[in-house]
Amino acid sequence: NQNKPNFNHYLFETITVLIRTSVSKNPGVLEQFEQILFPVFTPIFTEDIAEFVPYVLQIIGFLLESRPSGSTLIPDAYRALFQLVLTPSFWDHSGNIPALSRLLQAYIEKSGETIVVEKLTIVLGVFQRLVSQSKIHDHEGFAILNSLIINLPSTCLNNYLKDIFIVIFTRLTRAKTQKLIRCIIVFFSHFIIKFGANEFITQVDSIQANMFQMVVESLFIPELSKVDENDKKLCAVAVTHLLCDPEQVTKGIYFNHLWLKLLKALLALFQSSNDLQIMSVAERKKQAQDEAEEELLVGLDDTPDYTPAFSHLAFAKKPRTDLFGSSIPDARCHLAKCLQTLTSSHPNQFLNVMTNGLSTEHLLEIQKYCALANVTLT
């Protein structure tokens, strides 16, 4: 019903609620929904019914995400649709992009090592297009890239790593925004967790000598505490390993210039979480308003068919997952344990650096983290 867009929206919300409640009670009915809905949804794609396509993409993404974990075999209907999802013209309509990105991430999560690997160059082309050409949708490109990092074996990506970093640094040089910086820091964090801090330094320095120092000083140190609250644990764990694992940082060429600065940035990240908890309602509202205004201004300066109102289906929303779960319940304790390992292997060295270089407030914070983790720095 084109005259009643709210009716259309709630119709698709109703379908999503029906799927969610039914599958939660009986996972076996998922295939029945797929068999019923795919024949109905297919003409919406083939006839390009623009106002319905984003809704249908969200529902299909939700269906695919709801399939059992560990199952790499997906029905032929999904395989056929995957070819369409990778069609460049399908990404020309900005209203499709959030739902397309979410669906592509579902494919990576559920069938990454089979059908996605076969088309990995094309998938990375989607990432490059979104990051290089769109200020408003660049975060969707990073979401796809992060999903690849999380779900694919590292060997699948090794040959592409340098090109990925070049795409990111080229965009950063050409058109920097606050959102882009946050996305880059989160991607770097995923990379460090998957490939290790040593490999991260190697990749960055392979682009330009000593570029790692520039990345730390221009991105991590001033911007780390500004990442979204949901990403702070990931970033804290990654920076902890950047601080404690690679010899280039703990005793090599970067030690004198970066180690203490990086530790201070990490402590500021933990403090920013505390600040958010005590921030007033008015302050949070102002912060959200400022971020919304930046997104709108970026959108007006972006693609000609920019549409700021993408209608998310509330009941198809993808829940956020904690990569570490019970293995690292508290990033502050993780820092304390990693510092204990580092200081015990270098008696007095790092304790002296912290004692002489940190404020009393920062030293008390570290003592508190050590108490939480039940460790002592020596």
Image: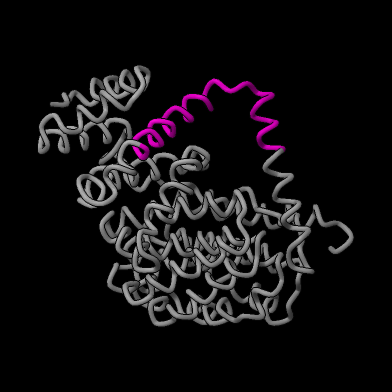
- Which residue sits at x=37%, y=70%? 161
377 vs 16, left or right, is left
345 vs 127, left or right, is left
When asked about the image quadrant of residue 300, the answer is: bottom right
354 vs 56, left or right, is left
Residue occupying the far right of the picture: 3
- Which residue sits at x=39%, y=68%? 207
Q: Between residues 266 and 247, which one lies in front from this camera angle?
A: 247
Q: Quadrant of the C terminus?
A: top left
The picture places residue 75, in percent across and down from the top left corner, at: 44, 76
The picture places residue 180, in percent across and down from the top left corner, at: 57, 54
Q: Between residues 63 and 329, which one lies in front from this camera angle?
A: 329
Is the magenta region chiefly helix, strand or loop?
helix
Q: Is residue 137 above or below residue 240?
A: below
The picture places residue 191, in percent across and down from the top left corner, at: 36, 58
Q: How was this image coloured?
A: one colour
When asked about the image quadrant of residue 60, the answer is: bottom right
Q: Is residue 243 above or below residue 66?
A: above
Residue 281 colored magenta? yes
Q: Between residues 250 and 177, which one lies in front from this camera angle?
A: 250
- Which residue sits at x=59%, y=50%? 179
Q: Between residues 311 and 70, which one lies in front from this camera angle?
A: 311
Q: Is residue 369 above or below residue 91?
A: above
Residue 271 colored magenta? yes
Q: Is residue 238 above or below residue 275?
A: below
- Which residue sits at x=38%, y=54%? 190
The picture places residue 306, in percent across and down from the top left corner, at: 76, 63
Q: Quadrant of the N terminus?
A: bottom right
134 vs 220, left or right, is right
Q: How many marks?
A: 0
Q: Which residues are magenta?
A: 261-289
